[in-house]
Amino acid sequence: MKNKILTYLENDARLTPVQIAVMLGTTEEKVRSIIEECEAEGSILSYRAVINWDKTGKESVTALIELKTTPQKDKGFDAVAEKISNFPQVNSVYLMSGGYDLAITVECKTMRDIAIFVAEKLATIEGVTSTATHFVLQKYKDNDVVFESDKSDKRGNTW
């Protein structure tokens, strides 16, 4: 039951304990208790909305940054990942397999702000050996939510 509740909330954080209880055929009190337990143990970390900022007029640029680093003795990649996680521009940090160690998503107002962030903050962290920055040009799907399309490929062609 706990995993079903978490799945429902992950798909729609606005669901109330009453609504979830009805879907599961149980009591509101049971659902509320499980949610409170999940919040206390850290299974539920946050309740968020997925926003299409392009529709709001907010100017921002998102970048995916590949980072190579030397693992630190007794800490591995954790110390570098924790340091990077504390920067307000950073939305996510993942330890990766493959050609680089950490994948980072960053959001700033301009491309120049991201370039400065990479040069002055990321590249100067002890153990960082290289970075590769990729700018997001268009979001089609984020957090399992498909963004609306204007049915045009920006060259005047319609589908």
Image: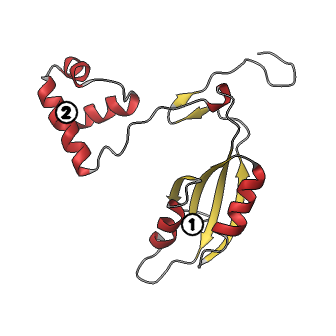
Q: CA distance from mark 1 to mark 2?
A: 36 Å
Q: Work out whether residue 44 or residue 159 is closer to the camera in this orientation and state it.
A: 44
Query: Where residue 109 sits in the image (x, y, percent)?
Result: 70, 46
Mark 2 lies on residue: 1
Secondary structure type for disc 2: loop
Instruction: Give the amino acid type for the residue marked by disc 1 in the picture.
Output: Asp
Q: Quadrant of the C terminus?
A: top right
Q: Quadrant of residue 8?
A: top left
Question: Which numbered disc covers residue 25?
Answer: none
Residue closest to the far right: 155
Query: Where residue 131 sits in the image (x, y, percent)?
Result: 69, 66
Q: Quadrant of residue 36?
A: top left
The tally of labels here is 2
Closer to the N terminus: mark 1 or mark 2?
A: 2
Instruction: Give the amino acid type for the residue marked by disc 2 in the picture.
Output: Met
Residue closest to the far bottom: 73
Secondary structure type for disc 1: loop
Q: Is residue 90 left or right of residue 132?
A: left
